[in-house]
Image (spheres, rainbow, N blue to C red):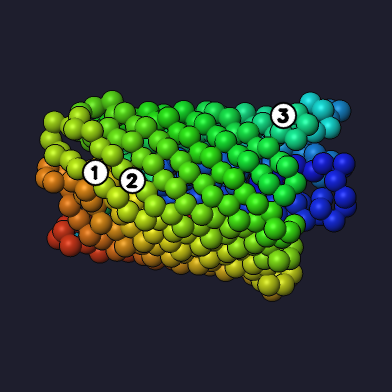
């Protein structure tokens, strides 16, 4: 169900229902950007929709550091210090390091009219490794974007440019024995939603560019054209079902991985029985049609199914959880395709005054090299772990956070297993 920014021509209950979705969609964005779920074009669209909906707060309610008329600028500086006991994701020769991360978050909003909102959200910084300077780099977090919503009668047209630049191997289940996996990603396009009350039609297009941050992984550099369409029927204000389809067409810069076309078709639902619970299931079928463009990998086409269940539930004022589980096929890094199943629960509570506590667990089983005949990495792996974060408001504007993350990887390849612990402190001002 498409979620738009506040429209005061709607009745008050309908405005409230839409506004209540914002924190739940923000949680969905966290999962989409961290795990790269779903098929290629559909994944890109889901992450973009979550980012756009989470940002569509009523302009008057947006916090700010600087305000001039309707223009608002919010600056959120932070400073983090992490200890990582295995920066290269190695099985037998773990090397530790201390990483300093100064970061600045920037949010700019300007309502061009009462219904047309221009936004810029960027979170950027630098990570300095004290022992392994070759891993030091700039980064721009996922979710950074320039976005403009345009309303024309029953149409919402969203123009956007979403971008990220990061180097963090430990957040990608597909690799081991490296600390330099990273990429620059940019997706520019538009998404059009036609809201006919009971029926909603959606069509989106994006041009995506992906460039590796290290020469070791230049084979993953590519450009993709992505199309997504949806048609939904709103049975009542709380329940929508529909059909969705997508297509993506990928060409690599080098002749290592095979160019491909990916198509998917499926069903989805969106159920929100109350302001605190949001349930989104989807299921469908996907086809990868590979072209023989690689000089080293002999390929064949691949057909599979996809499914995802995402739940966000605020049980009380102090306790809430998120849950995501599913099955997918996605493009690989050292192989044409990876087929995996995943489950990711998370729990957040603030039952102690002044403290926010969050825990997450994650598990992924993947098979690399699916659909190929020979010449690429063939591997079955299990990637799992969890994290704990505790934050305390030192003042009304200053927050101190303590974070811990454990990541474990097992593999049927002898040297592709590892264990990693990361402990960090972060100071944030807003």
Residue located beneath label 1 in the image: 301
Label of residue 76 in the image = none
288 up-or-down from 396: above or below: above
Separation of residues labelled 3 and 2 (CA atoms)? 34 Å
Q: Give x and y (percent) for residue 402.
A: 55, 61
Can you say whether 136 is above or below 323 in the image?
A: above
Residue 150 is tagged as 3
Residue nearer the viewer, 185 or 232: 232
* 413 relative position to 314: left or right: left
Lower sequence index among marks 3 and 2 = 3
Q: Is residue 157 above or below residue 172?
A: above
Discs 1, 2 touching: Cβ within 8 Å: yes
Under tag 1, what secondary structure? loop
Does dot 2 land on a helix, a strand or a loop?
strand
Measured Cα–Cα span from mark 1 to mark 2: 8 Å
Q: Which residue matches tag 2?
A: 287
Residue 347 shows in the view? yes
State which tag comes first along the sequence, 1 or 2: 2
Contact between labelled residues 2 and 3, with CB atoms less than 8 Å apart: no
């Amino acid at each position: 169900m498409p979620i738009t920014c506040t429209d005061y021509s709607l009745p008050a209950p309908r405005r409230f229902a839409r506004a209540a979705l914002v924190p739940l969609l923000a949680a969905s964005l966290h999962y989409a950007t961290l795990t790269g779920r779903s098929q290629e074009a559909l994944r890109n669209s889901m992450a973009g929709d979550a980012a756009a909906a989470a940002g569509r707060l009523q302009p008057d309610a947006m916090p700010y550091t600087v305000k001039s008329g309707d223009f608002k600028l919010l600056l959120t500086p932070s400073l983090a210090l992490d200890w990582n006991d295995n920066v290269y994701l190695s099985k037998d020769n773990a090397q530790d390091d201390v990483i300093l991360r100064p970061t600045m978050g920037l949010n700019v909003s300007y309502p061009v009219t009462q219904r047309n909102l221009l936004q810029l959200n960027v979170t950027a910084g630098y990570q300095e490794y004290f022992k392994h300077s070759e891993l030091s780099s700039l980064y721009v977090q996922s979710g950074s974007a320039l976005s403009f919503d345009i309303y024309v009668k029953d149409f919402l047209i969203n123009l956007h440019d979403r971008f990220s630049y990061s180097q963090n191997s430990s957040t990608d289940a597909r690799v081991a024995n490296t600390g330099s996996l990273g990429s620059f990603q940019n997706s520019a396009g538009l998404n059009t939603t036609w809201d006919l009350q009971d029926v909603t039609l959606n069509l989106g297009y994006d041009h995506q560019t992906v460039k590796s941050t290290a020469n070791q992984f230049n084979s993953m550099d590519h450009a993709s054209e992505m199309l997504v369409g949806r048609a939904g029927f709103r049975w009542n204000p709380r329940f929508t079902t529909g059909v969705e389809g997508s297509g993506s067409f990928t060409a690599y810069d080098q002749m290592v991985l095979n160019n491909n076309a990916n198509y998917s078709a499926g069903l989805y639902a969106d159920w929100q029985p109350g302001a605190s619970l949001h349930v989104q299931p989807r299921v469908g079928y996907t086809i990868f049609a590979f072209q023989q463009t690689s000089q080293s990998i002999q390929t064949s086409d691949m057909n599979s199914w996809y499914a995802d269940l995402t739940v966000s539930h605020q049980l009380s004022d102090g306790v809430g959880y998120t849950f995501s589980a599913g099955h997918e096929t996605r493009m690989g890094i050292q192989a044409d395709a990876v087929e995996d199943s995943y489950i990711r629960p998370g729990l957040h509570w603030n039952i102690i005054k002044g403290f926010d506590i969050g825990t997450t667990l994650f598990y992924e089983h993947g098979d690399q090299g699916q659909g190929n005949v020979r010449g690429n990495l063939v591997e079955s792996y299990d990637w799992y772990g969890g994290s704990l974060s505790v934050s305390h408001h030192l003042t009304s504007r200053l927050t101190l956070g303590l974070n811990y993350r454990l990541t474990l990887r097992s593999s049927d390849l002898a040297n592709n297993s590892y264990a990693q612990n990361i402990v960090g402190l972060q100071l944030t001002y807003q």
